[in-house]
């Protein structure tokens, strides 16, 4: 009897897998950053959008059958996927399908929860006839080989497998928290508990769900249909599906770790203004935990054709320079100083201005002599000459959003610049 090689086994499993990326949420904790876009469509890392990370993980893992479920203000997200992710080869069975909420079950229901979103597309899942369904959140930043998780699922003969990581207990209230046996089988699961349980022997640390699930497809159908018939259910994987199956079926936890070191790998939920600002600025470090320069695991995206960044003037009182920063294509630093900041594409910083400890989204113009400190400037902002942001939070709060961590969020609307017209 010939034994199948591990790599061949993973390739076969990934080929038989359909990935569904849940990308319909607003992400209200990001405040005005999601007034006009869904959280997965928020720009990240100088040239990407958040959803590029789970989509790149799928492609790099060999999963080429992908559905993206959208709902809240999805136009920019849909356009980004159409522009940057339309190179699948249908002849090879590859695709990325957009699955917007379209009242498929009846004429009243939008997606009511994560499980309901998948249930409303159950006919589409059946048409693709996968052996496994990989369900992903579309709003986290990480690099993960899903093939290893799928192989673990098969090895454990699991009905369902949950990707998990260790988090401090005081942060675990925002996650589903689980207890497991030594072999990884899930014993209990609580969604966003007020008092999360610590891992035995590791006080202060909890085991949290990443919102990544592998299902045997037939088992998924059974649970979705059962849940849809339950009028008391909130139709959510964490609140309803998982707690209802762990006592009866084989549900396992898959630890998210680096294969070589065994340490927990990089993962960020950029769900607040503070965490979004911090995760972006982490990237400018000498050796950041998230390596965007990794040729073995590239992050794919829509690449706008832009000229190189330009730094002009070298006079003592007017020098265009950026230090300890990342500056994207199309940017012009004209006699201004940028320190410890991340600039997305097409940002112009004019003479005498200074930008420090800030994240500047695309198409922003910073006027002459303006001073920006510890801020996030949303796409399209035009900062007037001489404006000061981030130095006096009492003044900042009169016009802008100031986070608990002292990050000032500025959008065009706050500057009375109406980029979005609603009538």
Image (cartoon, rainbow, N blue to C red):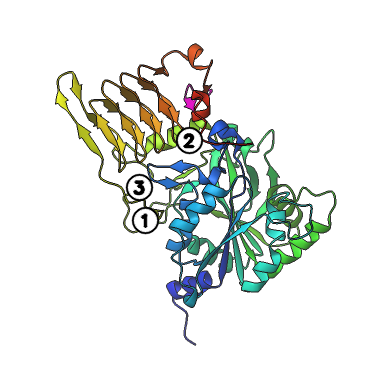
> Label 1 belongs to which residue?
298
Q: Is residue 203 visible?
A: no
Nearer to us: label 2 or label 3: 2
Residue 386 shows in the view: yes
Establish if 260 lies above or below 354: below
For residue 174, side relative to residue 270 (left or right): right
85 in relation to 28, above or below = below
Real-space Cα distance between discs 2 and 3?
17 Å
Residue visible at 53% across and 46% down in the picture: 40
Q: How many marks?
A: 3
Provide the secondary structure element on which disc 2 rests: helix
User: What secondary structure prevails in the magenta region?
Assistant: loop
Compare residues 176 and 112 and report the one nearer the observer. 112
Q: Which mark is residue 276?
A: 2
The answer to which of marks 1 and 2 sits earlier in the sequence is 2
Q: Is residue 118 above or below residue 401?
A: below
> Which residue is disc 3 drawn over?
291
Residue furthest toward the right?
A: 231
The residue lying toward the viewer, choosing from 242 and 76, is 76
Q: Marks 1 and 2, how far apart in space?
A: 21 Å
Give me the disc on residue 218.
none
Q: Is residue 158 left or right of residue 349?
A: right
Q: Residue at x 46, y 52 (%)?
A: 52
Pick out the residue farthest to the front. 423
| Tag 1–tag 2 contact (CB < 8 Å) | no
Image location (x, y in percent) of residue 372: 37, 22
| In front: label 1 or label 3 | 1
Quarter occupied by residue 272: top right
Q: Earlier in the sequence, mark 1 or mark 3?
A: 3
**Residue 320 image offset from top left, x and y in percent:** 21, 28
């Amino acid at each position: 009897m010939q034994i199948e090689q591990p790599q061949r086994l993973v390739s076969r499993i990934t080929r038989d897998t359909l990935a569904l990326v849940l990308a319909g949420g607003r992400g209200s904790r990001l405040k005005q950053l999601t007034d006009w876009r869904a959280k997965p469509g928020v720009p990240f890392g100088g040239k990407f959008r958040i959803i590029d990370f789970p989509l790149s993980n799928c492609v790099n893992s060999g999963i080429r059958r992908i559905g993206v479920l959208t709902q809240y203000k999805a136009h920019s997200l849909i356009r980004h996927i159409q522009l940057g992710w339309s190179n699948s080869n249908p002849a090879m069975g590859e695709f990325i399908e957009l699955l917007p909420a379209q009242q498929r079950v009846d004429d009243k229901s939008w997606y009511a929860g994560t499980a309901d979103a998948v249930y409303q597309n159950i006919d589409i899942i059946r048409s693709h006839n996968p052996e496994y369904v990989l369900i992903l959140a579309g709003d986290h930043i990480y690099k993960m080989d899903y093939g290893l998780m799928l192989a673990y699922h098969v090895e454990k003969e699991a009905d369902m497998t949950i990707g998990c990581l260790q988090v401090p207990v005081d942060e675990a209230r925002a996650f589903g928290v689980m207890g497991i046996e030594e072999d990884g089988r899930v014993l209990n699961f609580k969604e966003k508990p007020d008092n999360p349980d610590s891992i035995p022997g590791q006080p202060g640390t909890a085991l949290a769900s990443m919102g990544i699930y592998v299902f045997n497809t037939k088992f998924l159908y059974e649970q979705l249909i059962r849940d849809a018939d339950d009028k008391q259910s909130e139709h959510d994987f964490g609140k309803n599906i998982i707690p209802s199956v762990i006592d009866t079926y084989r549900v396992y936890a898959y630890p998210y770790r680096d294969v070589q070191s065994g340490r927990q790998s990089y993962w960020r939920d950029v769900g607040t203004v503070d965490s979004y600002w911090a995760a972006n600025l982490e990237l400018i470090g000498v050796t950041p935990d998230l390596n965007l320069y990794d040729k073995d695991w590239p992050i794919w995206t829509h690449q706008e054709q832009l000229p190189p960044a330009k730094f002009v003037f070298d006079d003592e009182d007017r020098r265009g320079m950026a230090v300890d920063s990342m500056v994207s294509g199309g940017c012009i630093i004209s006699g201004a100083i940028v320190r410890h900041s991340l600039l997305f594409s097409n940002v112009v910083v004019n003479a005498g201005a200074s930008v420090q400890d800030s994240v500047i989204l695309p198409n922003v113009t910073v006027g002459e002599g303006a001073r920006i400190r510890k801020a996030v400037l949303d796409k399209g902002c035009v900062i007037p000459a001489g404006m000061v942001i981030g130095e006096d939070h009492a003044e900042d709060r009169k016009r802008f959003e100031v986070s608990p961590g002292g990050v000032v969020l500025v959008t065009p609307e706050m500057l009375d610049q109406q980029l979005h017209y609603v009538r």
